[in-house]
Every structure is written in C-alpha cells, then in structure tokens.
Image (spheres, rainbow, N blue to C red):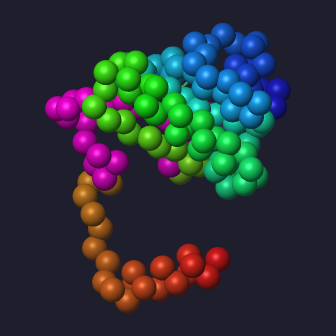
Amino acid sequence: MDDCIFCKIVDGDIPSRTVYEDDDVFAFLDVNPLADGHTLVIPKDHHETIEDMPADVAKELFAAVHELVPAVEDAVDADGSTVAFNNGEAAGQEVPHVHCHIVPRFDGDGNGPIHALFGGPGEMDDDELDAIAERISER
Ligand code: AMP
Ligand code: ZN
C-alpha cells in the first residue's frame, strides 16, 4: 500500500534496523522501543489486522515469531518477553499493517502482565461465560 510506513520499510524506502527477513515475513527494531530489543514482526504483504491475513501468511508470521522470540531475548539477556498484537484501532493499533510486538522483559522491570491493561479481571457469572464460549465455538 502506497502510504503505509511498514510497506515502505519492507520496500526499503524507509530505513529500518532489519533483524530477520524471509519470503513472507520481515522483522525490525521498533524505533521507539518500550525496552531494549523491542522488535516488530510483520507480513511483507499489506494486511491491516490479524483477521485480514490469509491463514498461510498467519502461519509464516507465527513461525517467524517462534524463531525470533529466543533470538531477541538472548540478544538483550532478557528473562522473558511480552508478545502482543494491538489488533485494530480500538485496541490501540496505530500503524494499520498487522505487526507483532516482541518486547523483552526483565525480572523486576515492574511493567506488569497484559492483565494490567485492564485494571484486573472482570466479573462474569458461569452462564455468561458459557454463552460466550458457545458463540465463539459455533463460529
Ligand atoms: P502499534 O501502536 O501497535 O500500531 O505500534 C506501532 C509501532 O510502530 C510503535 O511501537 C512505533 O514505535 C513503531 N514505529 C512507527 N514507525 C516506525 C518506524 N519507521 N520504524 C520502526 N518502528 C516504527
Ligand atoms: Zn502496509
């Protein structure tokens, strides 16, 4: 897509600190890292969200994430990592080209789990949980 910064990075029109590339996937350091080694993993083709990606692209993307997580963690001597997608504008996605964040984590870094985004678990009774599980599995 012409006006997509991540497509421009894939095409080499915008420079990046590239850490991985194969036929379908590209990975580079985030320019405003949340932690040392913060890496973005993207499909080379333009797809906005996870649901927009064809299944084969999603498989290749996750295969690259699977390879990159230990490489990124080792490179910065991390103790773990938060691996996440901001999927869609409502979730805070700012660049509309699907990307996986690998953010290295360190013992005692104080940044909390993904649960911290939501201020703690919600309250839901068993019937509501059952109904939602059924709607998802039916789809
Ligand atoms: P998101 O909010 O999930 O859409 O995240 C977009 C990410 O892209 C942010 O963490 C930005 O720091 C990062 N970013 C934006 N422009 C660039 C760029 N030119 N090179 C590397 N990372 C970028
Ligand atoms: Zn794009």
**Going by the image, does 2 lie left or right of 93?**
right
Name the residue at the right extreme: 2
Left or right of 117 on screen, residue 63: right
Residue displayed at 26% across by 54% down: 119
Q: Is residue 30 left or right of residue 52?
A: left
Majority SS type along the magenta span: loop
Residue 11 pos. (x, y %): 78, 19
Queried whether the magenta region covers residue 64, the answer comes back as no
From the viewer's side, name the closer residue of 21 and 39. 21
Q: Nearer the viewer, residue 86 or 77?
A: 77
> Residue at 28% of width from left, 73% of height from top?
123
Q: Name the residue at 46% across, 19% down.
A: 32
Q: Is residue 63 above or below residue 8?
A: below
In the rendered view of the protein, which quadrant contains the C terminus?
A: bottom right
The single residue placed furthest to the top in the displayed view is 15
Looking at the image, which residue sits at the far bottom? Answer: 127
Q: Count up the numbered dots.
A: 0
Name the spot of residue 84 as percent of width and height, x first: 47, 43
Q: Quadrant of residue 135?
A: bottom right
Considering only vertical position in the picture, is 133 above or below 103? below
Q: Is residue 66 visible?
A: yes
Q: Which residues are magenta?
A: 91-116
The quarter of the image that holds ligand 1 is top right
- Identify the residue shown where x is 59% and y is 49%: 88
Q: Residue furthest left?
A: 108
The answer, for residue 94, to whether it is visible in the render is: no
Q: Quadrant of the N terminus?
A: top right
Residue 9 appears at what percent x and percent y?
Answer: 70, 19
Which of the 4 quarters of the picture holds residue 45? top right
